[in-house]
Amino acid sequence: MSEGDSWLWATLVLLGAYHGINPGMGWLFAVALGMQERNRRSVWRALPPLAVGHGLAIGAVVALAGLAQWVLPLGTLKIGVAVILAAFGLHRLVRHWHPRGSGMLVGFGDLTIWSFLMASAHGAGFMLLPFLFQLSPHGEHAEVHLAAGAAAGAGTGLAAVLIHTAGYLLVTGLAAWIIYTKLGVAILRKAWLNLDLLWALVLLATAALTLVL
Amino acid sequence: MPLLRPDPTFYPSPKLAMQAPPEKHAFVALLNPTFKGKPDALAVVDVDPASKTYSQVVGQLDMPNVGDELHHFGWNACSSCLCPYAPHPHTERRYLIVPGLRSSRLYVIDTKPDIRKPKIVKIIEADELAARSNYSRPHTVHCGPDGIFVSALGNPQGDGPGGVFFMDAETFDVLGQWELDRGPQHFAYDFWWHLGYDTMITSEWGTPKMFENGLVPDVLLNSGYGHNLQFWDLRRRKHSQVLDLGKEHQLVFELRPAHDPTKAYGFVGVVISLKDLSSSIWVWHQSSGSWAVKKVIEIPAEPADPDKLPPLLKGFKAVPPLVTDIDLSMDDRFLYVSCWGTGEFIQYDVSDPFSPKKTGSLHIGGIVRRAAHPGNPKQALNGGPQMVEVSRDGRRVYFTNSLYSTIDEQFYPEGVRGWMVKVETKPEGGMAFDPKFFLEHPELRTHQVRLEGGDCSTDSFCFP
């Protein structure tokens, strides 16, 4: 890892924090489960599956992009990713899809799937790609040691997913804890800003960044 | 333009919803019973006591078609939008979904920017509803966490099964039947849910052919109408349990689950018992992993002079209470019960759902009683307490007096004259008519009331 990469890693953590702060990405679910079961432990119990689902959703996109790098020139791939991000962003401006078939009686598996679908539906994984492309051992050195390059790429990808998910988990847990124990859900009426709108704008911004970086 | 903060009428919990400001307007479905070229309408009623036009109709939207039979209706979105598993808090509570129970047509009505001038923005015709869901006769509308749910009483041919269909909350397109597996369920009527328990409950009337020309005495006397409560897995859209109230208990109507999502019980009204013409209220509740039901209130028929009874009842020499609607206050403390036959309106304290205490009773209208309103004590009224709506803070209750065009005629053969009244309640129980609120409609019959910003039979919650 070069010195210049540290801001990229920081961005991945911050994106995790940004995903985590969105009530629709998990912490509100944890709070609701705690209130429904009248048990603080239910809040904590919800966090691991939420993080696993989120991490898997991010990981799936990162892995796909990693594979795509083998068959597509980076320039083409970046254009593809930018188009996908822009499509997600524009779609979220006009429609608010969310996974059907969830509910309040949910176990580890249900919460993992829910978190996976929620992150995927919001294009969360794609948001990381422009920064990840900067980290990838791509370019003039990559073709020399193909196998070594692949291993390094996979290692970087995995590290990126883990550090992003850590940022997500930290903020999700913190938000759930503060709302559950201190603030209460009344605050939702005032403080729940339209993150969908912001989210759509961030998606559009990262689409642009993909092309510029 | 999307909202930047949650719709101010959304509340995470019933407790918070009780702090909502008092409503200033009510919407009332108006039925034109003659079908002679005149349509039904949606009225906007001024319910702000400080206003000069208090208790008057201040807006009226006539439907573009005749013979819809407007009945129940509901909002496009409500507090369930804050549910954590499908949050969309920045949707506006703005559109009323208004079904025609006879025409099977659905109107989507925009209540903004001027609440007194609502406008139709979309019409879904019966053909489209049939093609997309194979249902007809849309009835109850509920705003769910992930879309709009509507019950329907039959198939397009007027037979069973009835059921529930699903509408997209943004485009208002009918998406199709909700049930993936309906089990033994055949009849439909009302539905609601326990969001905290992923459970839907449906109740039973009959198929359209069994009620569109009025109740069929032979069917009724042979226990042919619905007498079951159906329970469903709300997540998996599957039937899970049926509870038979006993076939003498005919017409299982309005469902009022506790608003607190951690409580697993609710109330349902049964219109008539073939044993003694009584009406009853039952409580369903969870008991060792499944649902059970228990009768907690029985309201007896009142002996009556046959000369004062309509042909249908003369032989019985009694007037049945006919509990046709019930409503539960937001704190799950008071249950309001309409006795459309005897003209009694009853308040029960149901803090302990298994032992309700009668805390208030009022009389107005009634088949025999014809009780007057204190605002005009000399005028005998017909129809009786029917569709009830309770304000979110529980301090005001509104009700109207028409049931269903052809059934109105069976019990009130001279034709129901539409009215709407308001009752003020005391926090610890007890209630009285507001003498200044008596709205009479000379031509049209009044049916369901919805309050601006929400009421006690609209919103559901995912937080206690």
Image (spheres, coloured by chain):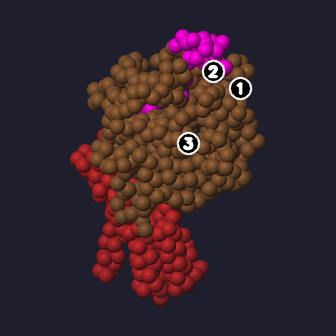
Chain colours: A red, B brown
Q: Residue at x 56, y 18 (%)?
A: B320
- The residue closer to the viewer here, A115 or A190, is A190
Quadrant housing the C terminus of chain B: top left
Question: Residue B166 placed where, x, y %?
Answer: 60, 49
Secondary structure beneath dot 2 equals loop
At a point 60% along the width and 43% down the height, the residue shown is B32
Report whether mark 3 lies on the same chain as mark 2. yes
Give residue B261's quadrant in the image.
Answer: top left
Mark on residue B216? 1
Q: Secondary structure at mark 3?
A: loop
Which chain is disc 1 placed on? B
Secondary structure under badge 1?
Answer: loop
Q: Are marks 1 and 3 on the same chain?
A: yes
Residue B443: x percent and y percent? Answer: 56, 42
Q: Earlier in the sequence, mark 1 or mark 2?
A: 1
Determine if the magenta segment contains residue B277.
no
Residue B174, quarter of picture: bottom right
> Residue B444, which numbered label?
3
- Residue to which mark 2 is pinned: B310
The answer to whether residue B16 is seen in the rendering is no
- The picture quadrant where one finds residue A133 is bottom left
Q: Residue at x 71, y 46 (%)?
A: B134
Q: Residue furthest right?
A: B157
Q: Earlier in the sequence, mark 3 or mark 2?
A: 2
Q: Is residue B311 on the magenta stretch?
A: yes
Identified at 34% across, 33% down, the residue is: B435
Please state the horizontal and vertical placement of residue A167, each as a whole percent of the image. Answer: 33, 62
Q: Residues within 10 Å of mark 3 (few under 14, many from 20)?
A: many
Q: Amino acid at mark 1?
A: Val
